[in-house]
Amino acid sequence: MKTTRMRRLRNSKAIRSMVKEFDISVDDLIYPIFVVEGQGIKSEIPSMPDVFHYSLDMLEEEIKEIKDLGIKSIILFGVSDEKDEMGSGAYSENGIVQRAVRKIKEIDKTFFVITDVCMCQYTSHGHCGVIDDEGYVNNDETIKHLAEVALSHVVAGADMVAPSDMMDFRVDSIRKKLDENGYENKSIMSYSAKYASSYYGPFRDAAHSAPGFGDRKTYQMDYRNRREALREVELDISEGADIVMVKPALAYLDIIRDVRNYTNLPVAAYNVSGEYSMLKLAIDNGILGEEAIYETMISIKRAGADLIITYFAKYLAKKLKESFYE
Ligand code: PBG
Ligand code: ZN
């Protein structure tokens, strides 16, 4: 009987765990949080089981829970029903995100707060920028607005801003704006390779941000393209991005690997709402075992991501604490 070395190294749980090549640490996880206007609200998002909308007065308990689990960072999304053509709610000093950041920093000033920078939750038409007469997003007008949005977030206390709009040169515009205003130390995590994807469906319900007309294909990437992701990443790095992101994650593992091989910057992957709900619903209905979550997260690590933004972050942190995966 011949046994290979690989086979011998699989023989027990202990040896498998010793020679494993990849793992997840709670330090890698970023948890998304949706904040809404109102009072006493903690309401489950129908298309995303176990994910909630929070009003500001309900944040304290949630932030404490997240911290106790060892999660170090969240990314904030504001949901606003005050919308206008120019998305001006996105950079108002008393906007929902700005107030949420201040609130979280009041609860714990060391907690690392990232904010999503975009306009679609605040525009009446639901697009990620300012619309011109022909119905296109006006790139150059939009990046000026985005810089204001980012500035308003760091003024409120955000540690890092994450532009998710996919306009050209928005990282440059934001970086300059932050520097001019004395925020050289605030960093930018850019949604660099963000594809126009069906997997954002549940998020758009959650964030009330579905476009009122057309789609986002004129600014988000075409999923038939691979090399183009590296052109986007190259530009964002040259404009000053500190972390580059690939989004979604699962249908784009090849892109994560390409970006990993291309740059020595940290790479983040966004395990988006549709990816979450797909897996969550399969597990809740007994179709898949819950270890599928860990397997899926490891696939994103194996592809080359350093950081994972995921709605499973709390679940994973709990399981890691219980040494469930050893
Ligand atoms: C806003 C934004 C979206 C997501 C993050 N920021 C939606 C979109 O671009 O349509 C998607 C997140 C998710 O699906 O979990 N620009
Ligand atoms: Zn947007």
Image: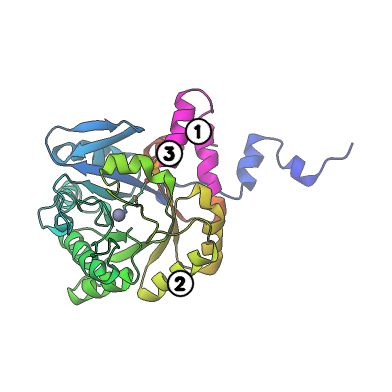
Seen in the picture, residue 317 relative to 262 is either above or below; the reply is above
Disc 3, SS:
helix
Q: Residue at x 30, y 49 (%)?
A: 74
Q: Amino acid at mark 2?
A: Glu
Residue that badge 3 annotates: 276
Q: Residue at x 40, y 57 (%)?
A: 217
Tell me the residue that label 1 is attached to. Answer: 324
Q: Assign the N terminus to one quadrant of the image.
A: top right
Label 3 amino acid? Tyr
Closer to us: 300 or 251: 251
Q: Quadrant of residue 220?
A: bottom left
* Image location (x, y in percent) of residue 23: 53, 47
Q: Kindly check if marks 1 and 2 are in contact, taking CB atoms under 8 A apart as contact.
A: no
Residue 197: x and y in percent read 43, 49
Q: In the figure, is residue 195 to the left or right of 140?
A: right
What label sits on residue 234 in the rendered view?
2
State which tag comes first along the sequence, 1 or 2.
2
Residue at mark 3: C-beta within 8 A of ligand 1: yes
Do residues under tags 3 and 1 come within 8 Å of each other at their CB atoms? no
Query: From which residue to which does the magenta span run?
Result: 274-299
Give the colouring mode of the picture: rainbow
Residue 185 visible? The answer is no
